Amino acid sequence: MATIKEIAEKSGYSPATVSRLLNNDQNLSISPTTRNKIMTVANELGYWKSHRKQSQQPIRPNIALLYRVSGKEQLQDEYFAFLRNEIIKEVDKAGLQVEIFGHIADLIKAADSFQGFIGVGADRVTQDQLIALHHKLPHGVFVDINPMPKLFDSVQPNLELTVQDALSRLVKAGYERVGFIGGKGLNLNNIQQADAREIAFREFASMQGIKEAPLYVDGPFNVENGYRLGRMVIDQSKDSLPEAFIIASDTLSVGVLQAFNEAGILVPRDTAVISINNSEVAKYVSPPLTSYNINQQTLSRMAIELLQDLIMHPDRPHVHLKVNTDIVYRKSFLNNNS
């Protein structure tokens, strides 16, 4: 069993300082570097494993928030902006300290001040940068998007099950021709990866017995691209518009609805729409969007708990959690059989 004295000797700090820190003394004033050194040694010696039964409070590390989200439109960034705010709220509830970084290089330089990090987004991040970050700060949990699941834990919405559920509801409501509108997935090291929602649609459409399942997938997840994709649907569909669409995000849906409205296509009379995210804008477009709600509070809380567990058990395998979504019915699709 690791003792305060052993931790003090290995870390180079006094037993009194070590004891006050490990017992969460709120009046203790020490630098982030000192805190990190003591916590790291405590982890290495297995202090938390041997004392978790006696301790009534969880480990309280200093953590970083790596927020890598691009885009200038507030509407485009709304989902990730809300997610960032929820993470900060949950960090505060947990009594932790957090510092926000917008560039991975800056976090790597400051890594010695933190015991772990939570990552949101992966804009303009390379594999080499992620490997360097893992070398300096191995305890990390990505929320929503995990660019390197071999190196970091993650908490993500269950988008595969979301698409499967949407298809099931559409089939149950009698729709036989269902299209999918989405954007491109994560680009890592200039390699474009397919988005999980697109993959799920391709896999489950035939399994659900959908007779026609055209896909319209290209570009970023923003309103402008949604409008462009909506125009593409109109040009390619001619007189055979799918009876319903699953759209990968509310931001894309806003642009699609604009294109449909301009062309005189009425939703849900001419085609129904089910969207994903249930962002604030979903209630105010015309018609209001039926959309799957992603519980960002749960994502944030689970990410913090997972990070604390990773810090306490650094040798365990990486864990990837999926959080289910729930549908919120509005006028773009009303399922009378639900």
Image (tube, helix red, strand yellow):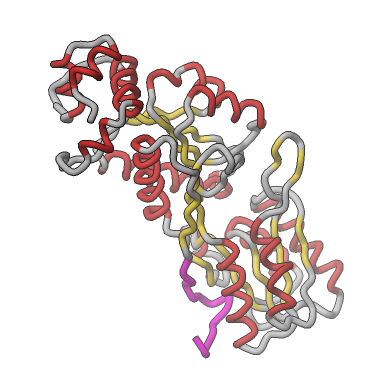
Residue 30 in the image: above or below residue 331: above
Name which quarter of the figure residue 33 lies in. Answer: top left
Residue 119 in the image: above or below residue 78: above
Is residue 213 found left or right of 44 in the rendered image? right
Q: Nearer the viewer, residue 21 or 123?
A: 21
Name which quarter of the figure residue 260 lies in. Answer: bottom right
| Horizontal and vertical percent position of residue 158 | 53, 61
| Horizontal and vertical percent position of residue 229 | 76, 59
Q: Outermost residue, front direction?
A: 1
Is residue 103 in sight in this rendering? Answer: no
Residue 332 part of the magenta segment = yes
Residue 262 part of the magenta segment = no
Quadrant containing the N terminus in the rendered view: top left
Name which quarter of the figure residue 266 lies in. Answer: bottom right
Is residue 51 found left or right of 105 in the rendered image? left
Q: Nearer the viewer, residue 259 or 131?
A: 131
Residue drawn where x is 30% and y is 31% of the image: 46
Residue drawn where x is 85% and y is 79% of the image: 239
Is residue 196 found left or right of 330 in the rendered image? right
| Horizontal and vertical percent position of residue 161 | 56, 68
Is residue 190 in sight in this rendering? Answer: yes
- Magenta: predominant secondary structure element? loop
Is residue 215 found left or right of 3 in the rendered image? right
| Horizontal and vertical percent position of residue 89 | 32, 43
Residue drawn where x is 38% and y is 50% of the image: 302
Magenta stretch in the rendered image = 325-338
How many marks can you see? 0
Residue drawn where x is 52% and y is 63% of the image: 282
